[in-house]
Image (cartoon, rainbow, N blue to C red):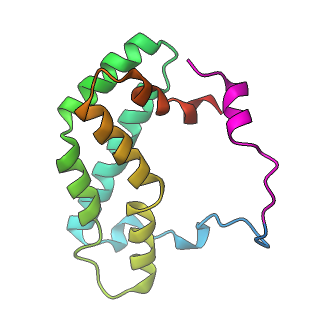
């Protein structure tokens, strides 16, 4: 497995940041009750999906993780799961604040995660792809 030191060498922490302040999207939060029922259901599903995945990749036993990760991918058809994520916000009102929240939920790291899960679904024997999901848990 890749070591913490190797990860830190690959992604240096001393990169200059020209932004006056770090973007944390704290002002983007909305109450779950503010969402349409269909979106509320999808957001609750998404957080459950991510919690389940986090519980798998956070284990230190690589062999167990790979087996559980493959089972997770089989249980949650990646194409169907990705369609669900993409549909978050489809029933949203014209509220620009909600549009920004939905954009943040669907984009960024979520896209990268689903690319990696899709790659692993197509080639379950590729342990290097599976291990790439562990890098985040090392930091």
Q: Residue at x 19, y 30 (%)?
A: 74
- Say whether residue 34 is magenta: no
Q: Is residue 42 above or below residue 70?
A: below
User: Is 78 above or below relative to 36?
Assistant: above
41 displayed left or right of 111? left
Q: Position of residue 69 (x, y in %)?
A: 33, 26
Q: Residue sitting at 24 percent across and 73 percent down?
A: 90
Q: Which residues are magenta?
A: 1-17
The front one of 123 and 90 is 123
Residue 71 location, quadrant: top left
Please say if 40 is above or below 75: below
Please state the total of marks drawn on the protein image: 0
The quarter in which the C terminus is drawn is top right
Residue 99 in the image, given as x and y percentages of width and height: 39, 78
Residue under the point 17% across and 49% down: 80
Instruction: Name the residue at 76% across, 69% down.
Output: 21
Is 126 or 100 nearer to us in this picture? 126
Quadrant where the N terminus lies?
A: top right
Residue 2 is one of the magenta-drawn residues: yes
The relative height of residue 18 versus residue 10 in the rendered view (above or below) is below
The quadrant where residue 4 appears:
top right
Is residue 102 left or right of 81 when viewed as pictured? right
Horizontally, residue 84 falls left or right of residue 26, namely left
Say which of 88 and 115 sits in front: 115
Residue 113, percent from left and from top: 40, 45
Would you identify the image quadrant in which residue 129 lies?
Answer: top left
Tell me residue 126's x, y (percent). Answer: 35, 24
């Amino acid at each position: 497995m890749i070591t913490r030191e190797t990860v830190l060498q690959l992604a240096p922490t001393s990169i200059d940041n020209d932004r006056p302040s770090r973007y944390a999207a704290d002002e983007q939060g909305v109450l779950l009750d503010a969402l349409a029922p269909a979106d509320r259901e999808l957001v609750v599903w998404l957080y459950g999906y991510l919690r389940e995945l986090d519980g798998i990749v956070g284990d230190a036993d690589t062999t167990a993780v790979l087996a559980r990760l493959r089972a997770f991918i089989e249980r949650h058809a990646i194409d169907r799961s990705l369609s669900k994520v993409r549909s978050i916000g489809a029933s949203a009102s014209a509220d620009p604040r909600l549009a920004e929240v939905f954009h943040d939920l669907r984009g960024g790291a979520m896209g990268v995660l689903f690319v990696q899960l899709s790659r692993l679904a197509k080639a379950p024997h590729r342990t290097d792809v599976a291990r790439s999901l562990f890098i985040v848990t090392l930091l």
